[in-house]
Amino acid sequence: MIQNPILRGFCPDPSIVRAGRDYYIATSTFEWWPGVRLFHSKDLQNWEQIPSPLRRESQLNLMGDPTSGGVWAPCLSYDGKRFFLTYTDVKTKKGRYYNTHNYVVWTEDIRGPWSDPVYLNSIGFDPSLFHDTDGRKYLINMVNGFKGVLVQELDEQFHLAGERRKVYSGSGIGCTEGPHMYHIGKWYYLIVAEGGTGYGHCVTMARSESIWGPFETAPDNPILTSNQEDMEALQKCGHADIVDTPEGEWYMVHLCSRPLNGQKWCTLGRETAVQKMVWDSEGWLHLKSGGRFAENVTEAPKGTVGEGERNGNREAYGAEASHQKKNCENPDKKAGFYDDFDGAILDVRYNSPRADYAAFADCTARPGFLRMKGQESLNSLHHVSLLGVRQQAVSCGAETGMEYEPAYPEQLAGLSYMYDAMNFYIFGKTVTEEGQAVLTLVKSDGGVVTDEMEPIPIPEKGLIRLRTEISRDGTEATFSYCIEGSWEWKQAGEPVTTQILTDEHCRGFTGAYFGMYHHDMTGLALTADFDYFCVRI
């Protein structure tokens, strides 16, 4: 059996393809760089993150994009020779005014490099590329305002050509988005998300004998949703894509969330789950388990059960967290994250807000350390020095060691636990107006910044270790520190709530991050040296 979610912590809007016996999933990244997360699997259970496709500014410029703007709902497709990725860069999302620009890139090797983009349109978001059985290609996307699903053919240069037609207005549930098209047998099928990306989220299926419609909605619509009476079950289930196995079995990947402790708090954001599907005699898809509620576990593909159970359905990575120093050991080496910065290339799991971290992070200037240049403060939508990894477990902890000698109160570096530019904690080192080095704990709640403890005097020089630990139920974070020489851990302030880092509080689409952070608002570009960074699960 496969334990859901298969991609944990901020991996929403999954799009899946199979190339031979290899499966690949692309998920949204919003304002985080690089654009689009990619994962590879042989069995739909164990997933390896591989390099993101959008790693050049010529492909994606997120500077100034709003929180939870940026890259929405990528669609990954394969025509037997090349992989294609369509994506939206959302520049504004206020009221009626959504500025949504759609692009396509491609590659013969999914690990890259990927092409520069071809602009498609700005009519709506959630574009997908459909490869018909006759070789023709079509752009499928929704219309801003959730006004329906459009189809338009693409020419050989991937430019839109010919008639643009609205082929489906939705089932009536509302908020029709995330369309994917399939040609199976005599039918053209549409899979769309409806109900909004919250607790009423669901998956609708429709079909037609022509790509141009008319499309009829499945009689048992929605074909997937959540049991809102059971907060232990997967919630917010919707935004789906389907794939077949080499043995002819069918699976659906979909967005989901796991609220904390029975409450509607989702620090892990929207994640990715998978369900086994079957076709009925009338040619409609259904959950193999029956009904329409997403299941926490589902049947594994033929011949893969033992491997999935043995690995515990954890994401696997090329660089395991095998080190056991600096109190960062992980009993499950594939479940955590550890980086001692001994190499020149940063791990594929790192993200930074809006801009390439190569602009501020360097592993070669001081071997064995990450040198981070200070830029603007964390509430900026432009040049921010934060290198982080997404939170993947309800209860976990993050830690780093740092050498840093600030000279002004406008300089601050340390450990950040954050959701977006308006909602975060920063636990770090700075100086008072009198020049005394201190530790501070700062909270931003909806942009309102407060000090969460009295400053703690610390030595001007030397290594300091910073840690945050998340409670068993995920609702509180405790910060602590230790100073070079004594190495005795001391708690800093009182535990703080994680509620300000949830989708519901932030009204966002991402998830919580742990990261190394540095701002220098003097413009002097002071540097901080980080000795290691880890996340324990």
Image (cartoon, rainbow, N blue to C red):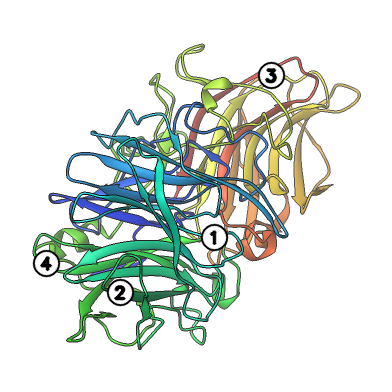
Identify residue type, mark 1: Val
Q: Closer to the camera, 535 or 294?
A: 294
Nearer the N terminus, badge 3 or badge 4?
Answer: 4
Tell me the CA gap for discs 3 and 4: 63 Å
Residue 331 horizontal/vertical position (percent): 34, 49
Report the side of 105 relative to 465 (left or right).
Answer: left
Residue 85 horizontal/vertical position (percent): 37, 44
* Residue placed under numbered mark 4 in the picture: 248
* Residue placed under numbered mark 3 in the picture: 461
Q: Residue furthest front?
A: 162
* Residue placed under numbered mark 2 in the picture: 208
Nearer the N terminus, badge 2 or badge 4?
Answer: 2
Tell me the CA gap for discs 4 and 1: 34 Å
Q: Is residue 44 above or below residue 452?
A: below
Observer-side mark, 3 or 4, equals 4
Residue 396 horizontal/vertical position (percent): 50, 54
Report the side of 422 relative to 368 (left or right).
Answer: right
Report the side of 534 relative to 248 (left or right).
Answer: right
Neighbor class of circle 4 (other Cα within 10 Å; few <14, some 14-19, many 20+) is: few
Q: Closer to the camera, 371 or 97?
A: 97
Q: Is residue 228 above or below residue 59?
A: below
Nearer the N terminus, badge 1 or badge 3?
Answer: 1
Q: Are marks 1 and 3 in contact (CB under 8 Å)?
A: no
Identify residue type, mark 3: Lys
